[in-house]
Image: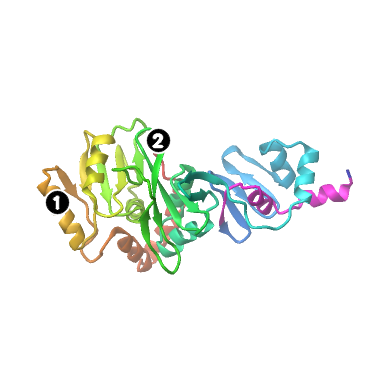
Amino acid sequence: MEREIIQRARQANLPEYLMSVGVPLIKSGNHRYKHAEHDSLLFTDNAYFWNSIQDRGNAIDYLTKHMGMNFKEAVTALTNVKPAEPRAVRAFEWGDISVYRSPDSVVRYLDKTRRINLCIVEWLLRHKLLFQEERTNNAVFPMYDENNNIVGAEFRGITNKPFKGVAGGSKYGYGFNVRFADDNNFDYALFFESPIDLLSYIDYKIYHKDEKFKRCILISMAGVKINILKHGLKTFAPNAKAILCVDNDTAGQNFINLVNSAGIDYALRLPDEKYKDWNEQITNMKRYCNPVGRMLERARNSLSLEL
């Protein structure tokens, strides 16, 4: 094999090749990418750095060490790569909805528009709690049941015409949920009006250096739906106390009254009175933070959200 071809392969654009074969990468800077499932695995134009296992190398090294190729196969693959849109890696099909795991548009939306900490977004990707719809590029928040099977999904439009919705055929009583207990034995069940509010609350807790959620399950009700609250408590957390984290508006107050009428024991954890919901609160906190606050925000970006 000619030395010139081998050198060209070593200098090939590694992120471009990986995305062309469906490896999920997240752009994290100029000519810099992170692997969606391994946050310590970084890629530049023609090199990789896997900090957690202290491994690094060029494009050929990565294909031979981590993609099961021999030297000749790696050189051939890298010298034949053509610039192209990343190929969709389908995560699951739901009715006529196809979703995939290269969610650049969704990541930008959550980061830039909703101001959700990128460490949270990357954690969601690693745990298969966030996808992007193939046809529309909208955000998909899967609903998992007690057996960790996907039984539905909530959608969030991220275009100029935003919308909220639930996938047709989603199983009754379930919502997007995030769990913090290895044995699924929860002391608290927190209920939100949307996945965005749920993630904003997690962000709020991390912002205040309270990043541990011990024995909690957080559930989106896709609105104010008492059937999801009742089913969530019965199915996931029969011994847990309900915590209502709804909006500061008429719909939120009406829901609290409805829960009172149903005789359900609960506590309230609402946003500050001047904010409508948790996302409005976290967005404004970051927008008007002082220099010390900005320094804390930069520092917290290095945190890893752990179960």
On screen, residue 102 versus residue 74, left or right, reads: left
Q: In the rendering, at what x and y percent does residue 98 appear?
A: 50, 49
Left or right placement of residue 10 versus residue 167 in this view: right
305 or 141: which is nearer to us?
A: 141
Q: Which residues are magenta?
A: 2-27
Determine which of the numbered discs, if any, sits on residue 28 in the image: none
Residue at image mark 2: 148
Instruction: Provide the secondary structure element on which disc 1 rests.
Output: helix
Q: Is 105 left or right of 166, judged from the image as shown?
A: right
Q: Position of residue 210 (x, y in %)?
A: 32, 48
- The residue at the far top in this view is 183
Q: Which mark is residue 258?
A: 1
Q: Name the one closer to the observer, 80 or 161.
A: 161
- Seen at 88% across and 43% down, the residue is 1
- Seen in the picture, residue 248 relative to 302 is either above or below; the reply is below
Residues packed near mark 2 inside 10 Å, few (<14), some (14 to 19) or many (20 plus): few
Q: Quadrant of residue 279?
A: bottom left
Label 1 Cα neighbours within 10 Å, binned few <14 / some 14-19 / many ≥20: some
The residue nearer to you, when weighing 126 against 224, is 224
